[in-house]
């Protein structure tokens, strides 16, 4: 077999057995610089991915997907001189569009009242900032599903319920008992419930 590809495209392949048939599954990965919309060379892409590997864990294993996906790995950065409390971000690829609303750290107060968001300069667009928690199998690394200690040095002390920093604009939490779909542009960890 001969494979021809551009220098910007990375090919990951896997052969799997599915319904008594051997299936060749190719996955094509492209990386783009967002400031100039130019594709990175494959040799430039892998160091960038490696730099985010702690939050990605596994990039892509070449499994069958029912449709193509586009993912954004990185941080939203405030380009103004003053910190912001909220920021809208959008990623577009052709006709496809993904939108997120970012908020600084917040928490629920007694009576289901939200605190105001704290200012921030940048935020990683990962699932650790989205809705979730150890009791929420859809995103066990997120925030908002569980009470957490106010002080990490005193795990049995006073606790708060934080709100997620990243939400889909049409699914923002209005009540503290809601469980919205976690918002992120990152890939989902292979060990999570949805990927099983």
Image (spheres, grey):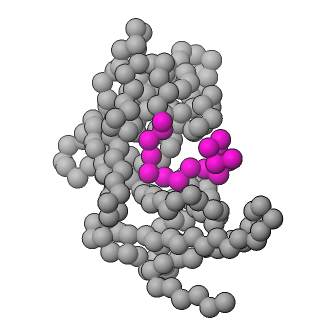
Q: Is residue 151 visible?
A: no
Q: Is residue 26 above or below residue 7?
A: above
Residue at figure coordinates x 40%, y 13% from the top left: 112
Q: Where are the magenta residues, as a range? A: 181-196
Give left or right: position of 196 versus 108. Answer: right
Q: Is residue 97 above or below residue 175?
A: below
Q: Is residue 152 visible?
A: yes
The x, y position of residue 78, in whole percent, is 26, 49
Residue at figure coordinates x 36%, y 14% from the top left: 113
Q: Which of the 4 image quarters holds residue 2?
A: bottom right
Furthest-left residue in this view: 81
Q: Nearer the viewer, residue 156 or 139?
A: 139
Q: Is residue 114 above or below residue 143?
A: above
Q: Is residue 145 above or below residue 5?
A: above
The x, y position of residue 140, in whole percent, is 60, 37
Residue at figure coordinates x 63%, y 62% from the top left: 64
- Magenta stretch contains residue 14: no
The image shows a total of numbered marks equal to: 0
- Magenta stretch contains residue 192: yes
* Quarter containing the N terminus: bottom right
């Amino acid at each position: 077999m001969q494979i021809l590809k551009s220098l910007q495209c990375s090919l990951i392949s896997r052969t799997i057995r599915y319904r008594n048939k051997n299936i060749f599954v190719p996955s094509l990965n492209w990386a783009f610089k967002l400031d100039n919309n130019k594709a990175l060379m494959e040799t430039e892409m892998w160091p960038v991915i490696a730099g985010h590997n702690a939050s990605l864990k596994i990039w892509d294993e070449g499994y069958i997907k029912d449709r193509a996906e586009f993912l954004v790995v990185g941080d939203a950065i405030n380009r103004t001189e003053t910190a912001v409390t909220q920021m809208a971000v959008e990623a577009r690829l052709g006709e496809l569009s993904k939108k997120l609303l970012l908020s600084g750290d917040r928490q629920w107060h007694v009576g289901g009242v939200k605190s105001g968001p704290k200012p921030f300069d940048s935020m990683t667009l990962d699932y650790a900032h989205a809705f979730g928690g150890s009791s929420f199998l859809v995103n066990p690394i997120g925030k908002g599903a569980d009470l957490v200690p106010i002080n990490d040095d005193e795990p049995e002390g006073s606790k708060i319920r934080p709100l997620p920093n990243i939400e889909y604009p049409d699914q923002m939490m209005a009540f503290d008992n809601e469980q919205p779909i976690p918002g992120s542009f990152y890939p989902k960890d292979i060990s999570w419930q949805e990927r099983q």
